[in-house]
Image (cartoon, rainbow, N blue to C red):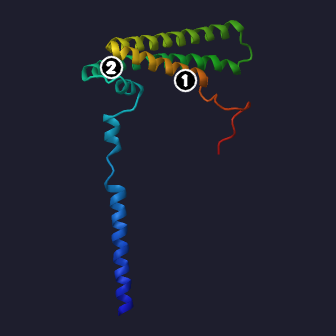
Amino acid sequence: MKKNTLLYLLLIVLLLANGFFLVKHFGDKPDHRVRAKTERRGPNNFIARQLDFNESQIQQLKDLKLGHREDMMAYDNDIKVLKNKFFDNISKENVTKSEIDSLATLISEKEKLKDIELFNHFRDIREICNDNQKSRFESIIKKAVNRDRRRGPKGSSRKHDGPPPPRH
């Protein structure tokens, strides 16, 4: 009987420990979906946090972001369509240089308009800032531009030439 009592006591301790760890693992965490909706970590929220925007400035920033996002998505869609047309020519037997040049020019014009839209968006954000915030905003933009220039195009930070290794 003494052996069974020891086993029952050990079983109860293990059940309590498992229960504790289950509650600790699943019970204490905040709902990440709720936090994600209320505290997004995008570039605009970064700017608002870094510049200590007040509620009015944050609302203005949100309004700017909505229009900017729609414009950028439209440019991205146009560029995607043009690039698809551009690269569809790879399989054509007879493609003229003027066709390729024309599509490349259209793509570059859309990219130019996209860059101008981004520039104007940053100018609009700058207009929301007070004088102290403007200098900090300009510093943030300069750092971001210089950081991107050092890295080059996305994915080009590799130190060797040739194609990337195959993914498994």
Q: Quadrant of the N terminus?
A: bottom left
Nearer to the camera, 83 or 156? 156
**x, y (%) of residue 46?**
39, 27
Q: Quadrant of the C terminus?
A: top right
Q: 140 left or right of 63?
A: right
Nearer to the camera, 69 or 87? 69
Find disc 1 in the rendering and name its residue: 147
Q: CA distance from mark 1 to mark 2?
A: 24 Å
Look at 35% across and 22% down and name the residue there. 51
Residues packed near mark 1 inside 10 Å, few (<14), some (14 to 19) or many (20 plus): few
**x, y (%) of residue 143?**
50, 21
Q: 75 left or right of 38?
A: right
Find disc 2 in the rendering and name its residue: 61
Residues packed near mark 2 inside 10 Å, few (<14), some (14 to 19) or many (20 plus): many
What amino acid is labelled 1 in the image?
Arg
- Determine which quarter of the picture holds residue 161: top right
Q: 54 left or right of 162?
A: left
Dot placed on the residue nearer the N-terminal end, 1 or 2: 2
Front position among marks 1 and 2: 1
Look at 55% across and 19% down and name the residue there. 146
